[in-house]
Image: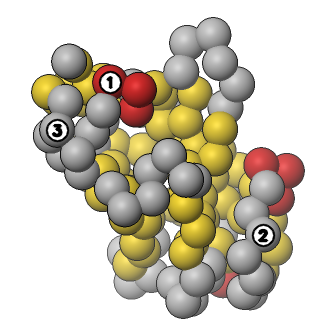
């Protein structure tokens, strides 16, 4: 059974930074892509960023491009999301997710491509 545990959320002033981490167990981490999604109150869960199994391909939502960076450390079975220049509209629960496709190196990452999810971590950027 795949388990994903997020950490690093919190309260920060607008313009500040946070780094989220997601530890993964129960799967060969280095064989699968990973993603981050977020869900604000009253809104649907939306894609934030994804990274391929090798780290060679990354993809970002337009709303976070240039501010957020996704990375992974396969030796630590961990994926990260560095969030800079946070805005109040970034406030949401952030979820990490594991891609169902081993060794996928394309650039298409849909919500349905992810089959395991963490419990989420709250990020609040105050104005």
Q: Dot 3 corresponds to which residue?
A: 15
Image quadrant containing the C terminus: top left
Quadrant position of residue 53: bottom right
Residue at the image point whose x is 51% and y is 84% from the top: 55
Which of pointers 1 and 3 lies earlier in the amino acid sequence?
A: 3
Secondary structure, mark 2, is loop
Quadrant position of residue 95: top right
Secondary structure, mark 1, is helix
Q: Using residue 26 as the reference point, say whether residue 86 is left or right of it.
A: left
Estimate the x, y position of residue 72 in percent, counting from the top left: 42, 74
Q: Using residue 49 as the reference point, say whether residue 88 is left or right of it.
A: left
Q: Dot 1 corresponds to which residue?
A: 88
Estimate the x, y position of residue 80 in percent, counting from the top left: 38, 61
Residue at the image point whose x is 23% and y is 45% from the top: 85
Which of pointers 1 and 2 lies earlier in the amino acid sequence?
A: 1
Residue 119 versus residue 27: which sits nearer the camera?
A: 119
Q: Between tags 1 and 2, which lies in front?
A: 1
User: Could you tell me how far apart the alpha carbons at marks 2 and 3 are, in whole angstroms?
Assistant: 30 Å
Secondary structure, mark 3, is loop
> Dot 3 surroundings within 10 Å: few (below 14), some, or many (20 or more)?
some
Which of pointers 2 and 3 lies earlier in the amino acid sequence?
A: 3
For residue 108, the mark is: 2
Estimate the x, y position of residue 34 in percent, counting from the top left: 60, 65
Could you tell me if residue 17 is visible in this image? yes
Residue at the image point whose x is 19% and y is 30% from the top: 14
């Amino acid at each position: 059974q795949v388990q994903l545990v997020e950490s690093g959320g919190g309260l920060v002033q607008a313009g500040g930074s946070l780094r989220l981490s997601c530890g993964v167990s129960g799967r060969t981490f280095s064989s699968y892509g990973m993603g981050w999604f977020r869900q604000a109150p009253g809104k649907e869960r939306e894609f934030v960023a994804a990274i391929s199994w090798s780290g060679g391909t990354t993809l970002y939502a337009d709303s976070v491009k240039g501010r957020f960076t996704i990375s992974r450390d396969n030796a630590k079975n961990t994926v990260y999301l560095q969030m800079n220049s946070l805005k109040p509209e970034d406030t949401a629960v952030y979820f990490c997710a594991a891609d169902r496709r081993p060794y996928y190196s394309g650039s298409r990452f849909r919500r349905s491509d992810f089959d395991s999810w963490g419990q989420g971590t709250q990020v609040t950027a105050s104005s």
